[in-house]
Image: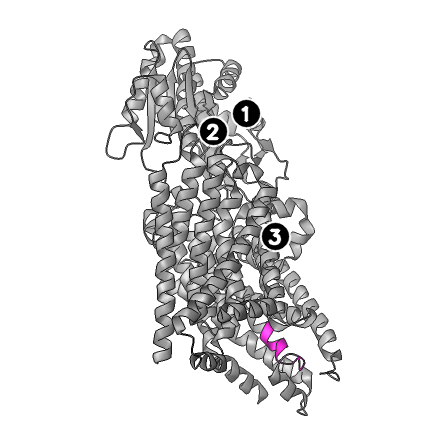
Amino acid sequence: MRFKYSLFRLLRDRSYLFFALAFPIILSTFFNVAFSSDIINIFESIPVAIVEEGGAHPMFNEILHELAYGEEPLLEIVPVTSLYEAETLLKGGEITGVFVLREEIELAVTRTGINQSILQTISNEFIRRSATITDIATARPDLVMEIVAEMNAGIDVNQGTGGLGTDMIIYHFYALLAMVCFMGSQAGFKVSIDVQAGISPLAARRSVAPTKKMAIVVNEFGAAVLVHAVVTFISVAYLVFILGINFGQSLPLIMLVCLVGSLAGISFGILMATVLKGKENIREATMTGISFVFYAAAGLFQSQIRLTVRSAAPILDRINPVTLISDAFASLVIYDTLDRYFQSLLILLGIVALFLVVSAAVLRRARYADS
Amino acid sequence: MQTLKYFFKILNYHKVVLVIYVFLFAMLNIFFTEFGTDMTEIFTPQSLNISVINRDDHPISDGLEQYLGDLHNLVPIEDDYTAMQDALFFWDAVYILIIDDGFGAAFYNDPDSVTLTNKKAADAAAGFFVDEQIDSYLLTLRAYLSADFELERALTLTLATSVQEVNVLILETEITGASFYFQVLPFVLVSVIMLALGSVLIVYRKDDLTRRMDVSPTPALRRKTQIMIGCALCALLIWLVFMVGAYFLTPHSLTGTAGLLRILNSLVFTVVCVSLAFLIGQVVKKSIVLQALAQILGLGMSFISGVFMPQEFLADSVLAIARFTPTYWYIRNLSMIDAVSPAINVDMGSFLQNTGIQLGFAIALFAAALAFGRERRAA
């Protein structure tokens, strides 16, 4: 019976439910809009200037002009009369690069970046091809035209294989789900606070009731896990049915991660509310802060951060619960066996057990003789 | 000024929470600055950890491996499916090229009849450039072979031409002191100011306290203004902490006109955060809701406005929405400051315009907070 009341109590907390659901739904909708078009929105014309010195490289000049022509041109050529003028425009940020056609081709830019890399690739490709064609023209002038045509046709030998992380976008949704799972810490936090008679009036009332404290905690914990898991399931359902994200065949496995992840979040919340000292909001602030560190170290904001953590402290990376949750998701994309998936979940369950044992040890000893 | 005095009393009561938030988010910002990467770097060709599984024993295959070795750092991994999956899963290698047995001979006979396979790590946008490099190499090699060059000579020439590069002059880069610190600052400021001020403002939402204040002779507007001033002073202090952090972490980003503009830009953004926190303080009654809102707004605005990923990579539709967030205008200003070299002045017109829009947000949010408070009391 007590379980029922614990459940009711959680369900009546509308604001908790609303925000636990609003968070994934709002953010995933943002993501979906962000990624529904091409992830990289680079196909806008890159403004450049060309400075010719003595009519060198007419061929390259022509190619550049061809690239600035057509419906969706890659380049936009800004006319300039001198190198000085071009450099002024470049420094002012009005153009991305200046091609200086001297004896050798030079490219001037002000910083590194994706558009700059495209300009670099264009010019590198040109000088490489012209070197090749010059070589061939010397040895077999009769074949030059044929080979130029062959080169222009491109080559299609190297092919990416599916299955191994070809879809980058889905990772952002996995990261989001990992975060939603771990946000169960808020619910866990409340479970623990509400049995500590030194902090909460409800707990004070409960502590004089004849019910064992552990029985209360177990019921509250069960209800929190149930509610939070349902919240994450609804988030998954929103992703699948409303946004149309394709998780493939692995939907039940994803839901299992959600369940274990919620368990991890909730037990983390219980641990924080139990072992930290001080007023409730101090404990809560510390918990939020530590959660953010977990998120950041798991690479949820930027994957590079996780890479650094991994090379600096591999152990920390292996025991970060948020990393384990997102790893469990990612393993479903990368591996065709479930070894790594279950390994991540088992470590996660081990951490959950550790959190709960420590919390129980601290909670059961608490006496409120002085409060 | 009684309200202001009591605001500080409440603030004092919450000082530990405040310090914890500021400390943790400052740590987080250090984390970002030290370990994070400006995403533009990732989309540039650079030396990567890649693996080549060469199952072939042919000069063409070996040549390709050698060529990739010249450009990248080759990580040896076992020729085993699980080992490859592990390498990608743990990001030991971001790109794995598999050259099957017999590739070289087959390519020699008919270059268009063979295939290579590759596996890329999930987040390796840079893998795109490795693809380009491999294509370029094979294209050149095919050209030499089609022109009836001896295999050995074709390979030597291919390797020689494939590493040719144009001379790239980078004019006065880095001098402006672009730093990831200021890039992620809006995320940190929104979160920390909202959480810190929010936990103080929630106190005012207790019914008894509201009623007690309502019967006092101090007009509501004056009371609110004083609380707002208190919030602003507190936020100013938080902002100062982060500026001191910037001084120690990225001193070069604070020098010159660019530095001054970065400081000004972040100060204006702080004002917006105060208004936002003030509005949230009028709406929110429970700490748990505050936590959730801080995360939704902090992360949501950052993701769509180009805090974690540059605006140039975001789709136009996203940026269209992002325009309705102050973060977008902060980042607009910042990228303008970062892009300009010291020889040329920042376009002050655009800077002031972006700054004005941020201030507009601050005023609108503050007005909304005042209106919301009235509405609530009337109800």
The residue that label 2 is drawn on is: B133
Name the chain letter of the residue that bears numbered label 1.
B
**Among numbered discs 2 and 1, the one appearing first in the sequence:** 1
Residue at the spot 56% in from the left edge and 70% down from the top edge: B10
Secondary structure beneath dot 1 equals: helix
Q: Which one is in front, B142 or B2?
A: B2
Magenta span of residues: A189-198
Q: Does A192 appear in magenta? A: yes
Kindly indicate the quadrant of the structure image that contains residue B297: bottom left
Q: Is residue A79 visible?
A: yes
Kindly indicate the quadrant of the structure image that contains residue B112: top left
Query: Can you give x and y, in whole percent of width and height, for residue A8 in the image?
Result: 50, 84
Residue at the spot 36% in from the left edge and 59% down from the top edge: B363
**Among numbered discs 2 and 3, the one appearing first in the sequence:** 3
Residue sitting at the far bottom: A210
Front label number (2 vs 3)? 3
Name the image quarter holding the N terminus of chain A: bottom right
Q: Which one is in front, A331 or A264?
A: A264
The residue that label 1 is drawn on is: B67
Q: Is residue A274 left or right of residue A329?
A: right
Q: Does A118 appear in magenta? A: no
Vertical side of A280 occupied by B318: above or below: above
Query: Can you give x and y, in whole percent of width and height, for residue B272 in the image?
Result: 42, 56
The residue that label 3 is drawn on is: B27
Kindly indicate the quadrant of the structure image that contains residue A270: bottom right
